[in-house]
Image (cartoon, grey):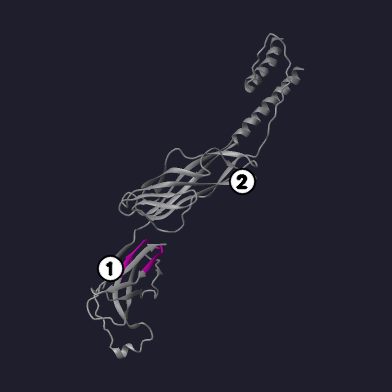
């Protein structure tokens, strides 16, 4: 008999714990009919459709900064001279539930780019996105949208950042609201 | 009855687990990639000739010219060596010079590059020696004397 009671009470306790239900009145029997609803929606997916490419440039004597806006516009500070070629902001294709909104979280710190030959580094900071980062800023119009990401590349002089290709990675998070 | 409850609880727990799984798919964390390329700055070494002796033609010779310019003379303007990043094209622009004397008389020299036959060229290798020629266009009434001026050569990456 005792074993049977255990068998019944244990699952009840587990369910009560998981659902957060609280029994308010234990000394009286109350019958409550509760309705539970759930909506299964499409999973949120994100795919990098264009990498963040600062393009070609020469730091010259002092170095400086290249700001690459989410719209893909480059601007320079210091002695940096742009060298043409292809440069573009990052693009992420977000797919999920129709008309759902989502939040964008950019990296909280800088990312490091490393020279593929001599391991010299430079930093990418001041992340920007379009739509701007925040809660519920993105909307999946038609179940899909594109988020653009830009940043600032901090460049040393020719000694600190000699000729070569520099690469790095960063993480960006998208969450349903 | 007990069996029925147990089954009900089992499916309830299963349903809750499904909700937890759905919540995981409500977030997408993706790794982005970054690239940048540092290239050599453009260097230019000048071997340009800066002094010329130009002939002003006589009145009879002047009358044969159909336009305002009565005399044009080809000048050897020397050369310039350009060193840029290997395999990356760059533009070369030559801008004409206005040469003047102290009295305000002036004429123009239009420099061109003989290397390509075009004043604006794209170079694919790291080093180029450009031979420069100029055309001096002198107008009527130009007096003899010393004239000075400057011209500009701009080299930049595409």
Query: Residue A11 at what x, y percent from top left?
Result: 67, 19
| Residue that appears at 73% across and 18% down | A32
| Residue that appears at 42% across and 46% down | A152
Dividing the picture into quadrants, the one containing residue A30 is top right
Q: Is B64 in front, or is B7? A: B64
Dividing the picture into quadrants, the one containing residue A26 is top right
User: Is B48 on the left-hand or right-hand side of A71?
Assistant: left
B52 part of magenta stretch: no
Q: Is B20 in front, or is A66? A: A66
> Quick check: A58 above or below A147?
below
Query: Residue B75 at what x, y percent from top left?
Result: 30, 79
Mark 2 and mark 1: Cα distance apart in space: 57 Å
Q: Which residues are magenta?
A: B80-93
Label 1 crowd bin: few (<14), some (14–19), many (20+), radius 10 Å: few
> Can residue B126 be seen here?
no
The residue singled out by tag 1 in the image is B46
**Image quarter of the C terminus of chain B:** bottom left
The residue singled out by tag 2 in the image is A144
> Can residue A114 be seen here?
yes
> Quick check: A8 above or below B127?
above
Label 2 crowd bin: few (<14), some (14–19), many (20+), radius 10 Å: some
């Amino acid at each position: 008999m005792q074993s049977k009671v255990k068998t019944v009470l244990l699952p009840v306790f587990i369910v009560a714990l998981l659902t957060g239900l609280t029994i308010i009145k234990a000394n009286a029997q109350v019958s409550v009919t509760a309705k539970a609803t759930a909506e299964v929606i499409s999973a949120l997916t994100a795919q990098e459709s264009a990498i963040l490419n600062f393009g070609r440039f020469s730091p010259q004597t002092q170095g400086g900064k290249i700001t690459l806006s989410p719209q893909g516009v480059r601007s320079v500070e210091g002695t940096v001279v742009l060298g043409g070629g292809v440069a573009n902001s990052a693009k992420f294709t977000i797919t999920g539930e129709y008309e759902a909104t989502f939040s964008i979280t950019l990296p909280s710190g800088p990312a490091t780019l490393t020279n593929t030959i001599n391991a010299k580094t430079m930093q990418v900071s001041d992340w920007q996105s379009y739509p701007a980062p925040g809660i519920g800023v993105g909307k999946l119009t038609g179940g899909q949208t594109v988020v653009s990401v830009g940043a600032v590349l901090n460049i040393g002089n020719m000694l600190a950042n000699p000729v070569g290709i520099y690469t790095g990675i960063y993480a960006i998070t998208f969450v349903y609201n | 009855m007990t069996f029925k409850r147990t089954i009900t609880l089992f499916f309830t727990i299963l349903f809750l687990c499904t909700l937890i799984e759905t919540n995981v798919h409500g977030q997408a964390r993706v790794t982005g990639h970054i690239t940048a390329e540092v290239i050599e700055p453009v260097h230019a070494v000048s071997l340009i000739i800066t002094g010329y002796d130009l002939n002003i033609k006589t009145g009879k010779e002047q009358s044969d010219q159909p336009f305002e310019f009565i005399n044009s003379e080809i000048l050897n303007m020397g050369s310039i060596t350009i060193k840029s990043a290997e395999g990356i094209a760059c533009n070369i622009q030559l801008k004409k010079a206005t040469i003047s004397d102290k009295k305000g008389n002036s004429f123009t020299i239009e420099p061109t590059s003989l290397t390509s036959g075009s004043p604006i060229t794209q170079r694919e290798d790291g080093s180029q020696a450009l031979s420069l020629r100029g055309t001096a266009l002198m107008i009527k009434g130009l007096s003899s004397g010393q004239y000075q001026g400057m011209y500009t050569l701009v080299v930049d990456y595409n």
